[in-house]
């Protein structure tokens, strides 16, 4: 590139910037298009009133697109974003690489000790907090109380997988368009594999043994996948292998699902009378187990992180502080009601008597507290993470394995073949990455 | 004279064509209708065609959530800018190939087209790094450059096939009369070439408007066009058909209207030399 | 013929295009070739050591590779067959006398202007979805079980969506060609008592041959790199049932962030695309020269 061209581009960039920024600092925030984030964008007037010198540019994207863009950007040090919305999978890996600003110096009013320990632990590497949780979630059973009653059943507070299949069979009425259970089937490490990995934990399965050998040829995985495929064939909706979180949420809100085992954060959407036809008839229970000591619930927190080397670190920190503060929770509560507050991050929220009245508050907290990312499985494993394995290679491998399991659900592959393929491709990938010598 | 066309025959063809036309158009019509429904009506069974409460709430919501005008403007700048830049480079090249063909002209042309077959994902990281190092990430300049390069081969080829149809005798005659290169281009070629250039331009604007890989990967906020606007509605939480429809309508309407108004011009040059 | 003067002027006029395209091709390509020999994962910074052909080995021995090639071919050929046959039929139909021809033409070409992402989203959610989609509703009206298009026949569904996008393009070009058909020739044949079918086979089709080759060439260029439609609807699945070559490369580079593997895949894709290109050019070249 010649220097004239360079100057030309530089001039263009300056001209482009000059039109938006006068004296204020502009920060670019990349976020996922989930309901709580969209809500935050509607509440920005509060931030601007407190910080008139900072302007926020939103980049709101669907989860997969967001992940590709921010990962490409941070790994190549592209510097396009000042704040990124990432999860508990990315934070430990990126933090260890030195890609993120430490957030240990957030103001005292932010009160790090108020963050739920399970969540805080997942966002901390070597004593440094690398991301501030915006909302936290585990998974739980959401079920239709009216349909359970009609079927003459009651849902235990701590159901087993046998309870779930019994209830699903009883509630299914395909002629009326009611499917006993809706579960994730769409391939992706954050979609069906999140659910299946967490479920497998409760069946005594794990991704790897202590020597990083893949475990899909074991009995426990076969039981997990057989149970899942059989249950979904019998009581699930058609097209389940394309249903992710959002698709299932829409189905549940329309009253087409008897049960749905998914993120606790969904509770505020299914119980919102404006969006959900069944808002008055939703009950909650802990994710099921098999009596092996582990439940099938995961742990996740969408969190705000600041890439190392950003030019606007101070403004970015100001924004992160505002968006994840106690005051923000009160702000949402005052504008939209307590049920719509971003859940699962702060002890003080659950200690608040107003919030305790929200029907799913206790179940959310119990679910989060019962997840243990450092000891996720029945047998010992060399990794941390409940519904993921916190190594960089995981998302690629789990996407491919997810495709296999999605095909098994669609019926285009058998359970045995899907597991065989999963075992093979995981072993290949782990060998290539140098874990298996 | 034309064959006898009985009214019955004409009516038959009319019904058949309209049926086919409406079937092909239906997905777009359905999207348009759905954009005026409430989310509940959008998934109602049986489907509602006109007898529902028409509302503009989705458009209001979409406009609250995203800066449509910014994305729209970026799309305009990128598609029109890259088209003009590409035309400036392509017209001379295509002219020269059409009127002063050398031994290698055909090969050069084929080679140009083959660069279009390079899978974009394969070269994303190199391009991303180059853009980062030159400060072109998230700038309209960067996207105009990329779109120009991507569509250049098709442009040259279209123009080439079009120019080739301009009868050589006219040029010969002009040369005999002592016209130099400049006046040859200005007074003879340009008027004859305008329809071809116009349709090439239109096609290129459409292709650039709809390109959804580079525009998505190389922008974040300032330069993001409508493709990114759509990406934020692709699967939000809960029922979203109506909002998705409203966003889709807003993203495709400008180019659809442009396409409809200019379809005559578009068609005239789309022949790629295939019509004698 | 051309004078020395005009020849050098011509060279001058071509060179910006050639130089630009050459740079556009060679610089990323050289970098991609270089990356394809490295152990380079975006998520693992630090030294990227040279690994020889290991990335190629893994890419080429991946069982999905052959499936992806097969799917790419099925996708390209499927769409070509549907759009060419459908395009000829539509062109013949629209060329008949009728009322409101202009409006019908506007309706038919509309899908060509729709962004691939948008059309994939609309088809996936509002038509093919087995619970809320319109097709499911029509199936139930007729007393059938709703068919789950995207899981049961993912590749066919994608072919359908892509065909819907490209049918207008084929129709437009073929219709223009139809309209340049000499009507006197047609009438003479009709006088001689040639049936509609033989008129179509002996007059219309030969007249359309060149247009059809053009449609095939242009569409193939775009169809080889179909990507957005797959990403939005099936993510290449279930399993690898709808993974084509660009999607496979995408998986390597942007889902696994394995730049080395993705680059190797990219190079393989470039080589294969060029083989198709050479083949196509031969065919087109022959047809267009005549």
Image (cartoon, rainbow, N blue to C red):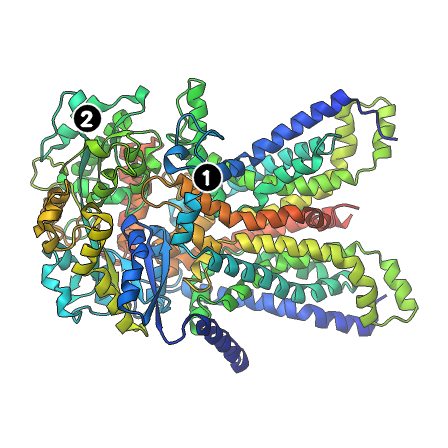
Vertical comparison of B121 with A273: above or below: below
Taking the image as shown, residue C112 lies to the left or right of residue C133, namely right
Residue B122 place in picture, x, y as percent: 45, 58
Vertical comparison of A430 with A216: above or below: below
Residue C162's tag is none
Local packing at callout 2 (Cα closer than 10 Å; few below 14, some 14-19, many 20+) is some
Taking the image as shown, residue C143 lies to the left or right of residue A216, namely right
The residue at the point 14 percent across, 32 percent down is A161
Residue, disc 2? A146
Nearer-the-camera pick, C138 or A433: C138
Q: Determine which quarter of the picture holds residue C182.
A: top right
Residue, disc 1? B36
Taking the image as shown, residue C144 lies to the left or right of residue A314, namely right
Where, quadrant-wise, is the C terminus of chain A in this rendering? Answer: bottom left
Q: Chain of mark 2?
A: A
Mark toward the viewer: 1 or 2: 1
Q: Determine which quarter of the picture holds residue C8.
A: bottom right
Q: Secondary structure at mark 2?
A: helix
Q: Secondary structure at mark 1?
A: loop
Distance CA(mark 1)–CA(mark 2): 33 Å
């Amino acid at each position: 590139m010649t220097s004239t061209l360079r100057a030309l581009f530089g001039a263009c960039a300056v001209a482009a910037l000059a039109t938006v920024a006068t004296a204020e600092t502009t920060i670019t925030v990349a976020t996922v298009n989930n309901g709580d984030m969209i809500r935050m964008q509607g509440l920005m007037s509060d931030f601007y009133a407190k910080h008139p010198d900072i302007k926020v540019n939103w980049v709101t994207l669907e989860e997969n697109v967001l992940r590709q863009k921010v990962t490409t950007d941070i790994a190549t040090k592209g510097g396009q974003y000042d704040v990124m919305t990432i999860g508990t999978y990315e934070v430990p890996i990126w933090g260890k690489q030195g890609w993120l600003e430490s957030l240990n110096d957030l103001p005292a009013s932010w009160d790090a000790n108020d963050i739920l320990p399970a969540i805080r632990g997942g966002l901390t590497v070597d004593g440094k907090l690398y991301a501030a949780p915006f909302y936290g979630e585990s998974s739980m059973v959401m079920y239709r109380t009216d349909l359970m009653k009609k079927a003459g059943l009651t849902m235990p507070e701590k159901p087993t997988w046998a309870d779930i299949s019994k209830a699903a069979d009883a509630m299914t009425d395909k002629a009326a368009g009611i499917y006993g259970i809706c579960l994730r089937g769409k391939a992706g490490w954050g979609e069906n594999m999140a659910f299946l990995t967490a479920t497998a934990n409760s069946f005594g399965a794990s991704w790897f043994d202590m020597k990083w050998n893949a475990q899909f040829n074991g009995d426990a995985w076969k039981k997990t996948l057989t149970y899942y495929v059989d249950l979904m064939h019998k009581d699930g909706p058609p097209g389940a292998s394309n249903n992710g979180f959002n698709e299932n949420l829409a189905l549940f809100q329309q009253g087409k699902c008897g049960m749905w085992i998914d993120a606790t954060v969904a509770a505020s959407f299914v119980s919102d009378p404006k969006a959900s036809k069944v808002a008055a008839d939703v009950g909650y229970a802990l994710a099921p187990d098999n009596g092996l000591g582990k439940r099938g619930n995961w742990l996740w927190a969408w969190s705000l992180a600041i890439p190392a080397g950003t030019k606007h670190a101070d403004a970015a920190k100001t924004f992160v502080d505002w968006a994840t503060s106690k005051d923000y929770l009160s702000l949402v509560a005052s504008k939209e009601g307590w049920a719509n507050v971003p859940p699962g991050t702060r002890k003080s929220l659950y200690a608040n008597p107003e919030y305790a009245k929200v029907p799913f508050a206790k179940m959310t907290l119990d679910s989060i507290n019962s997840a243990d990312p450092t000891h996720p499985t029945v047998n010992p494993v060399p990794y941390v993470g409940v519904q993921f394995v916190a190594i960089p290679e995981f998302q690629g491998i789990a996407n491919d394995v997810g495709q296999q399991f999605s095909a098994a659900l669609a019926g285009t592959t058998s359970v045995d073949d899907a597991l065989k393929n999963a075992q093979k491709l995981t072993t290949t990938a782990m060998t290539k990455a140098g874990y298996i010598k | 004279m034309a064959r006898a066309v009985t009214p019955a025959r004409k009516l038959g063809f009319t019904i058949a064509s309209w049926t086919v036309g409406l079937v092909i158009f239906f997905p777009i019509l359905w999207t348009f209708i759905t954009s005026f429904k409430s989310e509940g009506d959008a998934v109602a069974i049986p489907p509602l065609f006109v007898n529902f409460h028409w509302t503009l709430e989705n458009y209001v919501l979409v406009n609250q959530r995203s800066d449509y005008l910014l994305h729209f403007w970026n799309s305009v700048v990128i598609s029109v800018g890259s088209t003009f830049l590409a035309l400036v480079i392509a017209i001379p090249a295509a002219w020269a190939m059409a009127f002063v063909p050398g031994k290698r002209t055909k090969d050069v042309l084929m080679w140009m087209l083959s660069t279009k077959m390079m899978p974009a994902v394969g070269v994303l990281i190199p391009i991303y790094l180059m853009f980062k190092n030159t400060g072109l990430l998230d700038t309209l300049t960067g996207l105009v450059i990329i779109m120009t390069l991507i569509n250049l081969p098709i442009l040259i080829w279209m123009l080439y096939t079009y120019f080739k149809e301009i009868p050589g005798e006219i040029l010969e005659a002009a040369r005999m009369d002592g016209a130099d290169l400049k006046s040859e281009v200005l007074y003879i070629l340009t008027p004859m070439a305008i329809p071809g250039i116009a349709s090439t331009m239109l096609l290129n604007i459409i292709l650039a408007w709809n390109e959804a890989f580079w525009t998505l990967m190389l922008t974040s906020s300032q330069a993001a066009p409508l493709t990114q606007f759509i990406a934020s509605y692709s699967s939000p939480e809960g029922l979203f058909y109506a909002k998705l429809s409203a966003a889709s309508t807003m993203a495709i309407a400008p180019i659809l209207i442009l396409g409809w108004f200019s379809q005559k011009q578009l068609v005239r040059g789309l022949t790629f030399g295939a019509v004698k | 013929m051309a004078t020395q003067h005009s020849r050098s002027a011509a060279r001058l006029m071509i060179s910006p295009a050639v130089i630009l395209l050459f740079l556009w091709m060679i610089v990323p390509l050289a970098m991609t070739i270089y990356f394809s020999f490295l152990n380079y994962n975006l998520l693992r910074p630090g030294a990227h050591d040279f690994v020889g052909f290991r990335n190629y080995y893994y890419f080429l021995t991946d069982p999905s590779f052959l499936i992806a090639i097969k799917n790419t071919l099925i996708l390209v050929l499927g769409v070509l067959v549907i759009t060419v046959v459908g395009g000829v039929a539509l062109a013949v139909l629209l060329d008949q006398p009728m009322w409101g021809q202009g409006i019908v033409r506007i309706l038919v070409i509309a899908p060509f202007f729709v962004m691939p992402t948008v059309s994939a989203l609309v088809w996936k959610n509002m038509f093919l979805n087995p619970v809320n989609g319109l097709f499911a509703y029509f199936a139930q009206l007729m007393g059938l079980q709703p068919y789950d298009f995207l899981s049961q026949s993912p590749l066919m569904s994608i072919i359908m969506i892509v065909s819907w996008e490209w049918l207008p393009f084929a129709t437009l070009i073929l219709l223009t060609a139809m309209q340049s058909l000499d009507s006197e020739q047609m009438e003479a044949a009709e006088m001689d008592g040639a049936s509609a079918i033989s008129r179509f086979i002996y007059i219309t089709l030969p007249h359309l041959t060149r247009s059809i080759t053009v449609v095939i060439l242009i569409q193939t260029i775009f169809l080889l790199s179909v990507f957005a439609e797959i990403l939005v609807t099936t993510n290449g699945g279930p399993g690898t049932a709808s993974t084509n070559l660009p999607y496979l490369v995408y998986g390597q580079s942007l889902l696994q962030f394995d730049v080395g593997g993705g680059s190797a895949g990219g190079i393989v894709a470039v080589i294969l695309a060029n083989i198709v290109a050479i083949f196509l050019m031969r065919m087109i070249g022959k047809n267009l020269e005549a």
